[in-house]
Amino acid sequence: MDRRSFISAMSVLGGSSAIPLVASPDCNSSKGTDYHLLDEARKRPILKRELFSDPVIIESIELLRDRKNFICRVRSTDGTEGISISHPFLAKHSYPMFGYELIKRFKGKDARDLDMLIHLAAEQPAKMQGIPYCIQLATLEFAILDMLGNIVNKPAGQLIGDLVNPEISIYLGHHYSNLRKLPPEESLELMRLDAVETSARAIKLRAGIGDQMGLDRDSAPGRTEKLIRMGREVFGDDMVLMIDGNGSYSTSEAIRIGKILEEYNYAFYEEPVPWNWYEEQMQVERGLDIPMAGGEEEFSMHLFRYLIGNEVFQILQPDLFYFGGMIRTMQVARMTEQAGLKITPHISGGGLGYVYMMQMVSVCPAVYDFHEFKMFHTKDANGTLIPVESKAEKFESINGTIKAPSGSGLGLVIDPDYIKTHTLIES
């Protein structure tokens, strides 16, 4: 589906709720974008406060550490626990922010006020905003949602939305390095084996060198062009293929590669120019018909508002860690729905990323057809397998879909002996 067909289809699905991309005469932007409907959608309450008749006071917040790995544990005054595992490879860079800034903002507070607590924690400390800080905020939010879900015996996702996607269709988005460093024949064979294992119906490949520098570099001359062509040959016309540039290209080269993607019927083109080159991204978007995807590195709510209001991308990809959690991602999803666009939340491999993704997507409006999946990797930042057990259905991919977790909280139990290998560093 090309970009024009995609937009047309989304307008039909969105109906009268979708905002016009050409603003009304009373617009509040010099460039003609009317944001007021986006703002109304974003500001609606998210956490289902009505599920909790009495205050839920956060009595304790603990950050536990084992070398590079971090666990957050929270408890309410009635003794209910919530546990999350932090980002699998970036938490080690910013964990001091957890104790310095976040504990004082949440400890002793009523968890029913989570919408406002998250908003203030994300927006007030201007000099600490960014991905490292948002990772710590998301870690705490995941644990609080786990605790709240355990209190009312509901999945964490269903605390912030209704179950609209009981089955989650995946696209394989791993083999990041292999797809760029190995010859296409070898890397595509690795991906083919995982596609067979999961019965995935969609796969994301990798273009360019992926350095977020926009220097038009590749690991070998002609590798990306060959990968695009061979990807279609190996997987056939029925496989949904997309590709991620990870900021490899200048505007002109991004458009050149995009034309090849259109020739081979790729479903979307992700982040061809560096992530914050939004003017250049709009030039690429105007030069192509293929739907454009992006937003993975963005941590600003106001900039997501801009990206959506100006249709810089047709498919928005806030990262659940990098953007600061599920509540903020739901706000982006509601703006996305209002604009008649689509969203597919991003998540890193390792840790419990796939669990956070499933909780979010299960209740997310305006979702794209497929969602990033990097296999059931449950290794922590130290490379240790995290011993987890689902509270309900088995975590498995059948025909390229995974059932949304139905157990309480995050839907899983972490082996207490594993947690004991971590020591308290902040409380």
Image (tube, rainbow, N blue to C red):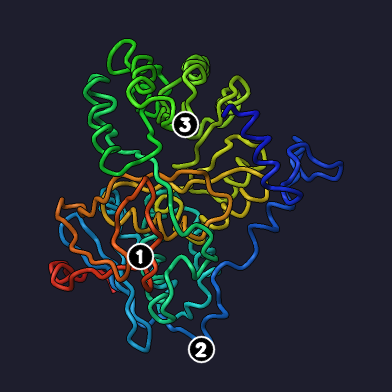
3D distance between C-alphas at marks 1 and 2: 29 Å
Which amino acid type corresponds to the residue marked 3 in the rendered image? Glu
Nearer the observer, 40 or 102? 40
Between circles 1 and 3, the one closer to the viewer is 3
**Residue 263 in the image, given as x and y percentages of width and height:** 50, 16
Quick one: SS at disc 2? loop
Q: Quadrant of the C terminus?
A: bottom left
**Residue 372 in the image, given as x and y percentages of width and height:** 39, 44
Nearer the observer, 336 or 40? 336
Please tell me whether residue 413 is drawn above or below residue 306 in the rendered image.
below
Between discs 1 and 3, the one toward the N terminus = 1
Q: Which residue is mark 2?
A: 54
Please tell me whether residue 231 is drawn above or below residue 80 in the rendered image.
above
Which amino acid type corresponds to the residue marked 2 in the rendered image? Asp
Residue 235 in sight in this render: yes
Between discs 2 and 3, the one toward the N terminus = 2
Which amino acid type corresponds to the residue marked 1 in the rendered image? Tyr
Structural crowding at the residue carrying mark 1, measured as other residues with C-alpha within 10 Å and reported as few (<14), some (14–19) or many (≥20) = few
Residue 60 in sight in this render: no
Q: Quadrant of residue 355?
A: bottom left
* Pointer 2 with pointer 3, Cβ within 8 A: no
**Residue 72 in the image, given as x and y percentages of width and height:** 30, 67
Question: Residue sitting at 46 percent across and 19 percent down?
Answer: 264
3D distance between C-alphas at marks 1 and 3: 34 Å
Q: Which residue is mark 3?
A: 271
Q: Which residue is mark 1?
A: 100
